[in-house]
Image (cartoon, grey):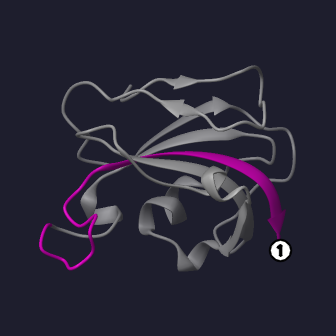
Amino acid sequence: MPGEVVLDGPMSLSKPEIERPDGEPPADLHIEDVVVGDGAEATPGATVEVHYVGVEFDSGAEFDASWNRGQSIVFPLGQLIQGWQEGIPGMKVGGRRQLTVPPEQAYGPAGGGHRLSGKTLVFVIDLLDVKG
């Protein structure tokens, strides 16, 4: 649906490129498995290790990517934006998933004080490990 992810091969561990999405942003969280993993499954209370890229839906402009820092990140799901809390569980290690997250499940409505408030965001997330 919104934005196409370009892969170098099945679950190649390289930074994905997200093409600018077409059409209107979805009103609800949109989850799309790009690559289905075959490892441990992420659960709502898990701590996950991921690599990710985030772009703004409207402009396609990248605002953050763990790939740019050359290092994956480890977080308890409960400390992440709601879109990640709902969009990562069920994903399996080795998988790559695209989440299109409306403002209400990201950084809130426009004027909310965060530079991404009011924006629909698109993330491509590679699940590297699940802890607990």
- Number of callouts in the render? 1
Question: Residue at the location (80% across, 48% down)?
Answer: 93
Q: Nearer the viewer, residue 71 or 82?
A: 71
Q: Nearer the viewer, residue 29 or 94?
A: 94
Residue 111, given in percent of the width and then of the height, sits at 12, 74
Residue that carries the numbered disc 1 in the rendered image: 132
Percent x, y of residue 24 = 18, 33
Q: Quadrant of residue 115?
A: bottom left
Residue appearing at x 34%, y 43% in the figure: 61
For label 1, the crowd category at 10 Å Cα-Cα, with few meaning under 14, some 14 to 19 and many 20 or more, is few
Task: Identify the residue at image location x=67%, y=51%.
Answer: 90
Image x and y of residue 84, in percent: 51, 61
Question: Residue 68 location, x and y as percent?
Answer: 61, 52
Q: Quadrant of residue 46?
A: bottom right
- Note whether 45 is above or below 38 in the view shown: below
Q: Is residue 129 above or below residue 32?
A: below
Q: Residue furthest right?
A: 39
Three-letter amino acid code at the position of disc 1: Gly
Q: Quadrant of the N terminus?
A: top left
Q: Which residue is most to the front?
A: 69
Please say if 73 is above or below 3. below
Residue bounds of the magenta highlight: 110-132
Callout 1: SS:
loop
